[in-house]
Image: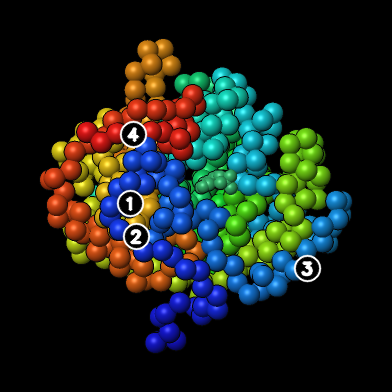
């Protein structure tokens, strides 16, 4: 396979993207309150806002879609999905949901979260954080220190949980006050960084010692498994599905946003090995999602997911996927752009503070970079920094600024070619060369739930 370094697919259908002028983009930015979520997608040239629900489906998935059984109860499509999920997760009980956040909600509500109790994680994703905030549980992020170092200091598994911090919280607050440990694979918030099998195993052993349940937030389970295969001793000869099954063997329940490694545009999963938990999840699904055998998904979407999960675990696909992210990272490094290294599974994260050292965190350097990238090249990325991760002191209301301050360039699966990535690298390289000319931004609107404010925030340029 010496020469076969290109994409492991060919393109059969295309979607036109619009080229726009800088003056047009400046007008659209003002209309959007400088919030990339409020831009119209048709005005975006290369869309790297998210890798969620943006995958291109394969011919097999489109064919499977036509086989959808839309019966209310007991549809064939559910059983096809169940079989595919069992094959990847190695767990018996499968409850579909309409998206990952619905699985988060079911997992948090009554089952794993209690008001006033702690939910330990590497870095909790914002939809779980929002659910926890509403329910009154306290999410704490215990990723290892290396995971917060955006510099080039190499660590193969920057998504690992710090066992000492976990032990310390259990000692200080008592195990009864810790309701759950959630391991997010890969760790979205710090660069799509993987979690090692050793860490998953040790976290699980520690949690088990104190009878604390372990849940895996597994949107990017296959990308995590690929990193384990490539980087962790003893896994080189294991298949991706052998690795995913071992990963899940250390947890009781998994939630999944299928919109990532499921290679579909919508869907979620709640998967468990515990029959009592499954029965509780079924009840919540019936109230909030739909009957047990569809849970908010149509039969055709379940068919596409059943196939997508298998394709997402294909090694040739994963090799291409992870290397495409690395390709963009390497192009940016050549231009001196400061990124989180090593690059992770689903995007490249640019360090906003190192990019714009003159812009203090309360003036949103990464958001400023998002705006500059769209303004210059029509490329849409997302801020994961002062706005998305900022919080407020519960008593004084004083802002608390996050340790990580980044702009994420998320790469959709099987969608863009490397020449689209060259556009991003060239534009960011030019902005970086002129970085001294930029000033910060002011937050002029935020919604009531702080952890979700980035979706609707409004800004002005300073
Ligand atoms: C790690 C993680 N968990 C949960 C979710 C929420 O999933 P969804 O967007 O399908 O509701 C996401 C979405 O980006 C995610 O990245």
In this view, 279 is above or below 48: above
Q: Residue at x 45, y 35 (%)?
A: 456
Disc 3 from disc 4: Cα separation: 46 Å
Dot 2 or dot 4, earlier in sequence? 2
The reply, left or right, for residue 194 in relation to residue 423 is: right
Numbered mark located on residue 67 in the image: 3
Disc 3 from disc 2: Cα separation: 39 Å
Residue identified by numbered label 2:
20
Q: Quadrant of the C terminus?
A: top left
Q: Secondary structure at mark 3?
A: loop
Q: Is mark 1 within 8 Å of ligand 1?
A: no
Horizontal and vertical percent position of residue 240: 56, 66
Q: Is mark 3 within 8 Å of ligand 1?
A: no
In this view, 325 is above or below 170: below
Q: Secondary structure at mark 4?
A: strand
Q: Secondary structure at mark 1?
A: helix
Marks 4 and 3: in contact by CB < 8 Å? Answer: no
The reply, left or right, for residue 18 in relation to residue 185 is: left
Q: Is residue 121 visible?
A: no
Disc 2 from disc 1: Cα separation: 7 Å
Disc 1 from disc 4: Cα separation: 16 Å
Disc 2 from disc 4: Cα separation: 23 Å
Dot 3 or dot 4, earlier in sequence? 3
Q: Secondary structure at mark 2?
A: loop
Numbered mark located on residue 25 in the image: 1
């Amino acid at each position: 396979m010496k020469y076969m370094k290109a994409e492991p697919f060919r393109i059969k259908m295309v979607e036109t993207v619009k080229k726009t002028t800088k003056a047009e983009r400046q007008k659209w930015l003002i209309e959007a309150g400088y919030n990339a979520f409020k831009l119209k997608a048709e005005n975006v040239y290369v869309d790297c806002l998210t890798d969620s629900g943006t995958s291109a489906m394969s011919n097999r998935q489109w064919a499977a879609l036509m086989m959808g059984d839309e019966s209310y109860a007991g549809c064939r499509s559910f059983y096809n999905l169940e079989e595919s999920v069992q094959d990847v997760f190695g767990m018996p009980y499968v409850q579909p949901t309409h998206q990952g956040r619905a699985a988060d909600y079911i997992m948090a509500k009554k089952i794993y979260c209690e008001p006033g109790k702690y939910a330990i994680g590497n870095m909790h994703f914002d939809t779980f954080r929002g659910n926890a905030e509403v329910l009154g549980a306290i999410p704490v992020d215990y990723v290892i220190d290396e995971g917060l170092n955006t510099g080039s200091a190499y660590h193969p598994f920057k998504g690992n949980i710090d066992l000492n911090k976990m032990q310390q919280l259990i000692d200080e607050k008592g195990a009864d006050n810790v309701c759950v440990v959630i391991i997010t694979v890969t760790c979205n918030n710090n660069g799509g960084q993987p979690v090692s099998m050793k860490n998953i195993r040790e976290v699980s052993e520690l949690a088990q010692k104190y009878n604390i349940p372990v849940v895996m937030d597994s949107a990017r389970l296959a990308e995590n498994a690929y990193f384990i295969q490539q980087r962790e001793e003893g896994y080189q000869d294991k298949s991706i599905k052998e690795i995913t099954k071992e990963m899940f063997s250390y947890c009781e329940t998994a939630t999944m946003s299928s919109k990532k490694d499921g290679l579909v545009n919508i869907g979620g999963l709640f998967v468990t090995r515990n029959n009592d938990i499954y029965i509780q999840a079924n009840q919540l699904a019936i109230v909030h999602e739909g009957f047990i055998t569809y849970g908010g998904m149509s039969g055709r979407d379940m068919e596409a997911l059943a196939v997508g999960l298998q394709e997402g675990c294909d090694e040739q696909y994963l090799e291409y996927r992870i290397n495409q992210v690395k390709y963009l990272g390497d192009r940016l490094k050549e231009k001196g752009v400061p990124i989180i290294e090593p690059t992770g599974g689903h995007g490249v994260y640019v360090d906003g503070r190192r990019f714009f050292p003159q812009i203090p965190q309360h003036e949103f350097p990464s958001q400023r970079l998002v705006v500059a990238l769209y303004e210059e090249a029509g490329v849409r990325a997302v801020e994961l920094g002062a706005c998305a991760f900022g919080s407020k002191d519960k008593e004084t209301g004083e802002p608390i600024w996050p340790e990580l301050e980044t702009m994420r360039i998320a790469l959709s699966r099987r969608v863009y070619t490397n020449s689209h990535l060259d556009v991003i690298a060239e534009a960011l390289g030019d902005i970086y060369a002129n970085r001294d000319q930029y000033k910060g931004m002011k937050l002029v609107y935020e919604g009531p739930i702080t952890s979700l404010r980035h979706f609707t925030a409004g800004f002005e340029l300073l």
